[in-house]
Image: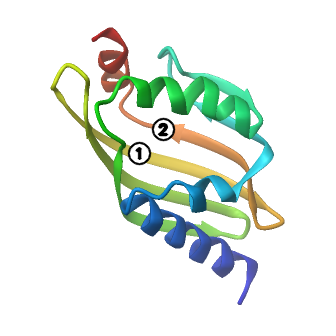
Amino acid sequence: MSATEANVEAMRAAFEALGKGEQGPFFGLISDDVVWTVIGTTPISGTVHGKTEFVERVGRPLQERLAEPITSRPRQILADGDHVVALWDGTSTMRNGEPYRQSYCWVFRFAGGSIAEGTTYWDTALIDRVFEQ
């Protein structure tokens, strides 16, 4: 199996687990020194350095504003060498009762079987609404 195929298979397995509410396989793919950029000007936009900072500055603040964990449904996973693109939909409910329906495009660069860089593209207006509630 090539590195590209291995990266795609790892992402498929991670999204399968996320769809069941298991976050471990996905977070296990992220390197401890990952560089992750969240596009836009939302309260959680910017570039973070390291898995811990990603969880603390992006993941936790978003999840705290949702009534339940995000359920993921991958639409497509594309790869070229060390680069993997995951197009997926996430659903949940905001704490104010509004639905959270997000379409994501995550672009990754793998190194040594782990995610070394990530970029999140999404509906920033929805993220702003989540943080305004």
Measured as percent of width and height from the top left, residue 88 is found at 38, 55
Q: Residue at x 72, y 40 (%)?
A: 51
The N terminus is located in which quarter? Answer: bottom right
Indicate how the structure is coloured in the image: rainbow
In this rendering, is residue 61 above or below 116?
Answer: above
Q: Amino acid type of disc 2?
A: Tyr
Q: What residue is disc 1 on?
A: 104
- Residues at circles 1 and 2 in contact by the CB criterion of under 8 Å: yes
Measured as percent of width and height from the top left, residue 78 is found at 52, 67
Q: Is residue 89 left or right of residue 44?
A: left
- Residue 121: image tag: 2
- Neighbour tally class for label 1: few under 14, some 14-19, many 20 plus, Cα within 10 Å: some
**Cα distance in 3D space between marks 1 and 2:** 6 Å
Q: Is residue 39 visible?
A: no
Q: Amino acid type of disc 1?
A: Tyr
Measured as percent of width and height from the top left, residue 52 is found at 72, 34
Q: Residue at x 35, y 44 (%)?
A: 70
In this rendering, is residue 22 above or below 122?
Answer: below
SS of the residue at dot 2? strand
Observer-nearest of 76 and 33: 33
Residue sitting farthest toward the bottom: 1
Q: Residue at x 35, y 31 (%)?
A: 123
Q: Is residue 5 visible?
A: yes
SS of the residue at dot 1? strand
Q: Is residue 125 left or right of residue 106?
A: left
Q: Is residue 63 left or right of residue 59?
A: left
Observer-nearest of 65 and 42: 65
In this rendering, is residue 31 above or below 9?
Answer: above
Measured as percent of width and height from the top left, residue 15 is found at 46, 63
- Residue 30: image tag: none
The C terminus is located in which quarter? Answer: top left
Q: Quadrant of residue 127?
A: top left
